[in-house]
Image (tube, helix red, strand yellow):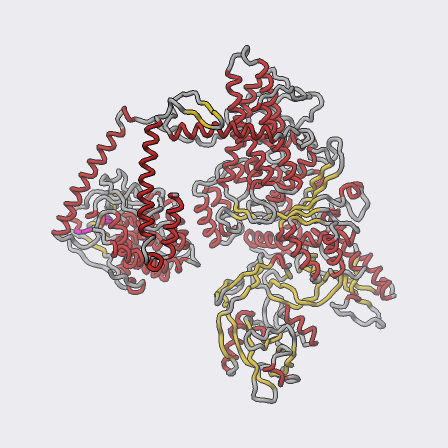
Amino acid sequence: MDFRSVAEAADQTRNTLHVASDNRESARIHVPELCKLTSSFCFILKEMAALFVSPHPDDFRSLLALIAAEFSSSSPRTLTEEPPASLGARSRPILVLDAGDGDAVLSGAGAVSWYLANQGKRAGVDPKQQSQVWQWLSFADNELTPVSCAVVFPLLGMTGVDKKLQQSSRAELIRVLKVLDKALEPRTFLVGETITLADVAVATAVLLPFKYVLEPSDRKVLTNVTRWFTTCTNQPQFLKVLGKITLCEKMVPVTLNTNPPPNAKAANAGPAGDPADATANGPPKTEAQLKKEAKKKEKLEKFQQKKDTEAKKKTQPSTEKKAKPEKKELGVITYSVPTAAGEKKDVISPLPDSYSPQYVEAAWYPWWEKKGFFKPEYGNPRGVFMMCIPPPNVTGSLHLGHALWLRHEITCFLSTMIFKMRGETTLWNPGCDHAGIATQVVVEKKLMRERGMSRHDLGRENFIKEVWNWKNEKGDRIYHQLKKLGSSLDWDRACFTMDPKLSYAVQEAFIRMHDEGVIYRSKRLVNWSCTLNSAISDIEVDKKELTGRTLLPVPGYKEKVEFGVLVSFAYKVDGSDEEVIVATTRIETMLGDTAVAVHPDDSRYQHLKGKMVLHPFCDRKMPIVFDDFVDVSFGTGAVKITPAHDHNDYEVGERHNLAFINILDENGLLINGMKRFEARKTVLQALKDRGQFKEIKDNPMVVPVCSRSKDIVEPLLKPQWYVNCTDMGKQAADAVREGRLKIIPDHHLKTWFNWMDNIRDWCISRQLWWGHRIPAYFITVSDASVKPGEDVDGHYWVSGKSEEEAREKAAKRFNVSAERITLRQDEDVLDTWFSSGIFPFSIFGWPNETQDLNVFYPGTLLETGHDILFFWVARMVMMGLKLTGKLPFKEVYLHAVVRDAHGRKMSKSLGNVIDPLDVITGISLEGLHALLIDSNLDPLEVEKAKQGQTSDYPNGIPECGTDALRFALCAYTGQGRDINLDVNRILGYRHFCNKLWNAVKFAMKTLGDNFVPSEKLCGDESVSDRWILSRLSAAVGLCDAGFKAYDFPTITTAIYNFWLYELCDVYLESVKPVFAKSEEDSTSQRLVCRQTLYTCLEVGLRLLSPVMPFVSEELYQRLPRRRPHSDPPSICVTSYPDTEEFCWHSAEVDRDMEFVMTVIKTIRSLRADYNLTKTRADCEMTNGRFDGTGLIDVEKEVAKLMTKKGELEKQMEKLRGKMGKSDYKEKVPVKVQEQDAEKVREIN
């Protein structure tokens, strides 16, 4: 079989155009000429156009035409009958156009699909794209189609099976698809940014392999092809023609269906029926082929008759089985009783038949808020528990991937609610961060998109007004999400880091630390984003790992830029013919080189001590310095030193007093205006011209990328404000070492000490407009006796809450009158982490001595993600100790990173970022796509994200409800391990809610309307009563221990097991016979069971409340109270169960009940094994043995066992004979020997 390359195929296209006139003479026109003709036939494609296609669902050539017709602006009539012979066209698809003076006839899949696709502007937007589309059409026709047919047709019974040929064809198919996979790696679609005819043609060419050949293991290798194919086939045009594609699970022969579907477009109904038509576009068949097909057809007819007979037998009444009931869809029931906001929900009306999140979650949260249940002042407190929220970005919204967020929320939900239920003064303080860079970028994009303006067009003051407008309009989304999640935050205390109270605290903190010399001015290297024109923090730098040469997109450059290569070149040694070879990944920075460094112990360079090397492009002489940081084994052992553009080189420059030469400005331009990465090419060429270039080779490396702008981060020398962290870092480390601050889990301690013990000073300047402007002023003195100052000289900088305050400080410092002082405030703003670092005490009014500050600071617990342990946690600890003399909290709980169901980190561009509200309320796939369009993603990323959504959520996301989401997040493994979050698991917990619902409804019916719960147990409880109370006590103990250890999966497991496996599956079933008896027979037993059942429900719901607040409140409100006049009004402020009150756990009772359940399981197993499921029998247990006399034919069972024993003895004899041969160990592979030995062990 000949598989030609794409280039060859492009020149040998076989599609033709026939123009049939009255005398039916045909003129052959090559495909490229068709492009010119399509425009002249545009008016023809109306109702009179007819498209003749094959009726068989797997005729991929006809499918190509049908899908292309769906993209056409005006679809033709589709006909499945044979086209008239007068048309002179041999094979379908055929498109007949009524041109008035004669029919215009297009035949062949390529020509027809091109014409139809061109009508819908899907054949390329320009000549270049049209050429690319034709190349892919040719690739599909010449490369994919032959090999696909060779593999698929034997499976469909259309050709004979030659296993060797089929295997080789399959291997060739995989090879061709790997070529396609490589081509699709950087692309969403084959040509351009939308689906074109190229995608339609190639997708239909691989349709049959995806349906019948490519198993999951194959698709895993062909990830890009599979992603692209899924995206294509989920487009509406494909779905209309193909239906929903079922991908192959195992490559096996397919039973043919000779009955074509009634609709020609129902193309996924089954495999091809008539091989003659399926290959209609091929060469005419020989007489021998026709005879062979006739025999095959006859066999198929007999086979079909047999299948029909079997089908009739199955429909006979005697063997008719009861059809399984269809699985019910999740019901949606809404709460319709008029209830004013903040008023209590109606709990008098009967409960709906089934659980519905919309019904259950309605009206409760406003009532909780109005009643003040979330306020620390509520109730009679015994102690204080305080947590402040890690302030979310004002630009942000929660999604299921926020390790910093959703795990945090659930931890806080549990902690605050449990402490409140334990009667402590509990405060969970909300807040929001102004997010300097993120907010400014969002608003700048909005300005440019809507008004075509930059922030510089507006000016600083007006731009800040725009940001405030945006904040007031859009910035409260995250608060809405938190309320929907049922968070127990005291909303009256909500804070924003740009509020006057917090802004005042930021100013005070800066001024105090500046006056003490802890904050100082210095010129050092910073992470610089040329796009943002600002320094950025380390957390805003993504580390992109490269394995070798890679082309990356860079903002401001039309072409991608090369990274991942090591360039070697030579510096000439001054005064000799020697040269020193150095290597670099950033060749353009050699313009700022001021030295070459070698290791002091490197014998190769000892003779060069005191020597200089010459810069090839200027008169600069650069010393050869000896420094321990050089790696002798890397390259030549000589390293170029650029102190102004590399962090390591900066330190070398400091140690050896080298010159610091800055070659770039803030925009990434050289002095001559050349862009930095254009200079890379120019410098490389200049080195080649001078003969000093040596080589380029691949080099694994890490490229720093700005997470906000996607620009390559540039180390740049800038004057900035720094915080001296040496002493503060030591205090923070000592606090943990001495046990005053606890970090959970403790495997993060190593990271903590590594950072704190080796801490560097913190750059707090940001070149932005949005944020806290630095309250520092540069001083100019109008006095001849005072020399002018420099920007980096801290003596000429003064800080103050106002210009007047700063002026007085400056006049006092220089001993001049205030009139002689001129001040210029720093244009920069403070790093967002600075205001976040003082958040735990600024929210309570610090530096003022307020009542809240005295009561709630220090806090009790901080819960956050381990990824910001240094960026936020460490800085809160350092600044808390520095400014208040106290630790901001006693414990730090660090949670895991949340990933999607496939283990991928959640990212907007992958389409796996899901709003929790969409999980709570449900959303369609179209709705998910619409959210992407409204986002800030680039068009390319939008398409990629759509593919991810279609793959993960083909039917959208079902309504799960808040309680199910909360329970799922708690149930996942915590304490530092990553979480692969699956929406299907969340849905499973919605079903758990329904189980609770039904259990409580049944119990309420059992309790009756006049039931009055008693204060204590009566002492007459049965074994089953005492067992369920024991299990309830065990669940209370597990929840208590899990809470103390922050082991939330233990809590959810204990609650889940108690409700589902112990209360519902065992106890409720065991008491049903008690309530089935007449009142006279079991009056006292009924009363005991009712009291036990009520206790389980009431305590079980209290255990559940912190995790599932809505459903537990809804059900709890329906239960009677033990003390109606004194019990709290809501379950969320009812005491949490503890082991002192519920101390009924009994290991002996547990063992007795376990024995009973083992007996029941054994009997059930025996009934199933011996087919006694329809037999009602009395069974006896004697000395732990089951007596089934009279139920089982013992002789028959013994005979069966003897037969089985004989078979095993034969197998053993055969194995021993095989293994006893003298050459067994030498000739038989070790793996086979191990398998034989294992078989012997199994038989024994």
Q: Is residue 880 above or below residue 1128?
A: below
Q: Is residue 500 above or below residue 458?
A: above
State the extent of the magenta-drawn residues as a range.
Answer: 88-97
Question: x%, y% of residue 366?
Answer: 64, 32
Tell me which secondary structure the magenta stretch mostly adopts. loop
Residue farthest top in this picture: 1080
Q: Is residue 1054 rendered magenta in the image?
A: no
Observer-nearest of 231 and 728: 728
Q: Specify whether residue 101 is in view.
A: no
Most extreme residue toward the left is: 287
| The N terminus sits in image quarter | bottom left
- Quarter holding residue 528: bottom right
In front of the other: 741 or 820: 741
Q: Quadrant of the C terminus?
A: top left
At 56% from the left edge and 49% from the top edge, which residue is drawn? 978
Say which quarter of the image contains residue 320.
top left
Q: Nearer the viewer, residue 23 or 1207?
A: 1207
**Residue 795 at what x, y percent from top left?**
80, 66
Left or right of residue 83, residue 1067 in this image? right
Residue 1171 location (% of width, % of height): 36, 28
Image position of 311 (left or right of 458): left
